[in-house]
Amino acid sequence: MHLGVSSIYLGIAKVYLDIMMRDKYSTALLIELEKRKAARFTELEGVVENPRTLSRKLKELDSLGMIMSENSLYSLSAKGKQAAELSRKWRELLESGSPENDVKNIERIPHPTFSKVLSRYSRILLDYFGERLFGVLVFGSVARGDWSVDSDIDLLIVVDGW
């Protein structure tokens, strides 16, 4: 199973992941604007309750070209629509699958997004390889905790009879 990110998303994936790694509010605003198509500031206060924080997040999304503002209405740009769709697929990946009790030490991964992805991927590997799977080891920047937006996830997958 994979996220299904096509080349159309590659241009925004780095910007989107940077947003998602920084805070949950920007992602929530993108999803809410996707649902509503357009919304006033007061309608978005249900997503981000603090007006100052909401204002700051809307400015950030605007500066990244994710949203537009016209006649006191906020809406998604084409880039924002792609980011919202990517967010939905990302959430589906993270929320799908079996309970996490098969995955050990996942709490040691320094970032919750990486830990969810690795937990899900480990469950996919366990479902596929079964008892032949000895382990999935994380190394590199994610394991050390000094990852960046450009980081990949380095894995060593140990399987009997690959």
Image: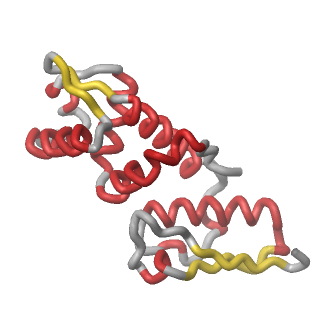
**x and y, in percent, of residue 14 in the image:** 43, 54
**x and y, in percent, of residue 127 in the image:** 77, 60
**x and y, in percent, of residue 153 in the image:** 55, 70
Question: Looking at the image, which residue is at 16% across and 27% down?
Answer: 41
Task: Report whether 119 appears left or right of 54.
Answer: right
**x and y, in percent, of residue 84 in the image:** 43, 36
Task: Report whether 77 appears left or right of 150.
Answer: left
Q: Is residue 64 above or below residue 82?
A: below
Q: Is there any visible trace of residue 38 in the rendered image?
A: yes
Q: Is residue 136 above or below residue 66?
A: below
Say which of 66 and 84 sits in front: 66
Specify the quadrant of the image occupied by residue 149: bottom left
Say which of 151 and 129 sits in front: 151
Residue furthest top in the image: 71
Residue furthest right in the image: 161
Considering the image in quadrants, where does the C terminus appear? bottom right
**Number of on-image labels:** 0
Question: Looking at the image, which residue is at 46% across and 42% down?
Answer: 87
Q: Which colouring convention does the figure follow?
A: secondary structure
Task: Report whether 50 appears left or right of 128.
Answer: left
Say which of 74 and 115 sits in front: 74
Task: Report whether 153 appears left or right of 136.
Answer: left
Question: Looking at the image, which residue is at 32% across and 50% down?
Answer: 24
Question: Looking at the image, which residue is at 47% across and 78% down?
Answer: 141
Specify the quadrant of the image occupied by residue 102: bottom right
Say which of 13 and 86 sits in front: 13
Q: Is there any visible trace of residue 108 in the rendered image?
A: no
Specify the quadrant of the image occupied by residue 134: bottom right
